[in-house]
Image (cartoon, helix red, strand yellow):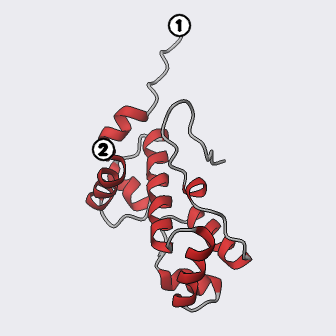
Amino acid sequence: MVFLRRPGNQAQFSAQLAAQTAQREPLREVQQWITEHPGADLSVEALAARAALSPRHFARAFQAETGVTPGRYVDRVRLEHARRLLEDTGDGVEEISRASGYGTPEAMRRAFVRTLGASPAEYRRRFRPAPSPARA
């Protein structure tokens, strides 16, 4: 289950909320596939093949229907996936960067700093819930 809106006063960074859902079925299916497979090859060429369109036609149609380029959409989905893993797991940054489709932890760090103004470690400190005290 994926919550599209974050609890409390935390910033809303959902790729699904930021971009429109495409009207055409092949583009909607590609959007869903991107969300489910952030670590996969999400190049325009690979996504266009999934939609059975030429890369140029796919890129134009995707932007026309969603309001963002395929690359920007992929960036948002990957960042959102990494954020969720930082908040919900104790996995290391290297493992999270791989699972989220970043080539290296440094690439993920740059994306975090550019978009959120904080490194993944800083983000985790700010937004990961504190562990509940053990009950006696």
Q: Residue at x 59, y 62 (%)?
A: 36
Q: How crowded is mark 1: few (under 14 residues within 10 Å), some or many (20 or more)?
A: few
Dot label at residue 136? 1
Q: How far apart are marks 1 and 2 (CA)?
A: 37 Å
Q: In which quarter of the image is residue 50?
A: bottom right
**Residue 53: x, y in percent?**
61, 89
What secondary structure is found at the residue carrying circle 1? loop
**Residue 109: x, y in percent?**
29, 54
Question: Hey, what amino acid is under mark 2?
Answer: Ala
In the rendered image, the residue lying farthest to the left is 106
Nearest the viewer among 50 and 118 is: 118
What secondary structure is found at the residue carrying circle 2? loop
In the rendered image, which residue does mark 2 sit on? 118
**Which label's residue is closer to the chain start, 1 or 2?**
2
Q: In this view, does 98 lie above or below 23?
A: above
Q: Which residue is drawn at 36% across and 47% down?
A: 116
Question: Hey, what amino acid is under mark 1?
Answer: Ala
**Residue 3: x, y in percent?**
63, 45
Q: Nearer the viewer, mark 1 or mark 2?
A: 2
Nearest the viewer among 40 and 55 is: 55
